[in-house]
Image (cartoon, rainbow, N blue to C red):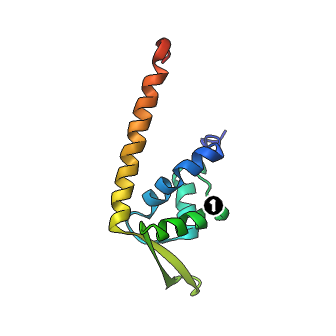
């Protein structure tokens, strides 16, 4: 039996995709398919980011100034790939979104306690 939980509901993933991407991009620059693979590997396949949602989200984050994209030559293939780096404002946005998510989950946990449910 697999240790992978079922994939998240699509609206839940969509609502947190920017947080997921900013979290992965923090640190070393990464290109799109590398981001997708890291998400999948780190979560045993729970986050399986599809190209149709990954690249529009990366472009949205780039337009907002949270990531910077630049073309570089891929080490293995030699073809150009766009790598994304977290900007200073992207780092601030990541921290704000992490705090917002932590507050949200803490408050949701309080609701689960209503009626004595644990």
| Nearer to the camera, 25 or 114 | 114
**In the image, farthest residue toward the front:** 64
At x 32%, y 67%, the residue is 88
User: Can you give x and y, in whole percent of width and height, for residue 63 in the image?
Assistant: 48, 70
At x 58%, y 44%, the residue is 12
User: Can you give x and y, in whole percent of width and height, for residue 47 in the image?
Assistant: 58, 51
Q: Does residue 20 appear to the left or right of 100 in the view shown?
A: right
User: Can you give x and y, in whole percent of width and height, for residue 64 in the image?
Assistant: 45, 66
Q: Is residue 11 visible?
A: yes
| Nearer to the camera, 52 or 45 | 52
Seen in the picture, residue 44 relative to 1 is either above or below; the reply is below
Splitting the image into 4 quarters, where does residue 113 fall?
top left
Seen in the picture, residue 37 relative to 15 is either above or below; the reply is below
At x 59%, y 51%, the residue is 14
For label 1, the residue is 53
How many numbered discs, if any? 1
Seen in the picture, residue 92 relative to 110 is either above or below; the reply is below
User: Can you give x and y, in whole percent of width and height, for residue 46 in the image?
Assistant: 59, 48
As helix, strand or loop, the secondary structure at mark 1 comes to helix
Q: Is residue 44 visible?
A: no
Seen in the picture, residue 27 relative to 77 is either above or below; the reply is above
At x 37%, y 65%, the residue is 27
**Which quadrant, please, contains the N terminus?**
top right
**In the image, farthest residue toward the top:** 116
| Nearer to the camera, 114 or 8 | 114
Splitting the image into 4 quarters, where does residue 66 fall?
bottom left
| Mark 1 crowd level (few <14, some 14–19, many ≥20, 10 Å Cα) | few
């Amino acid at each position: 039996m697999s240790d992978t939980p079922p994939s998240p509901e699509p609206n839940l993933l969509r609502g947190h995709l920017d947080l997921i991407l900013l979290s992965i991009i923090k640190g070393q620059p990464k290109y799109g398919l590398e981001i997708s693979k890291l998400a999948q590997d780190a979560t045993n396949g729970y986050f399986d980011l599809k190209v149709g949602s990954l690249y529009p989200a990366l472009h949205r984050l780039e337009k907002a100034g949270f990531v910077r994209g630049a073309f570089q030559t891929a080490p293995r293939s030699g073809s150009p790939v766009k790598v994304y780096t977290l900007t200073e404002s992207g780092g601030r946005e990541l921290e704000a979104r992490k705090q917002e998510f932590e507050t949200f989950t803490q408050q949701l946990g309080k609701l689960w306690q209503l009626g004595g449910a644990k």
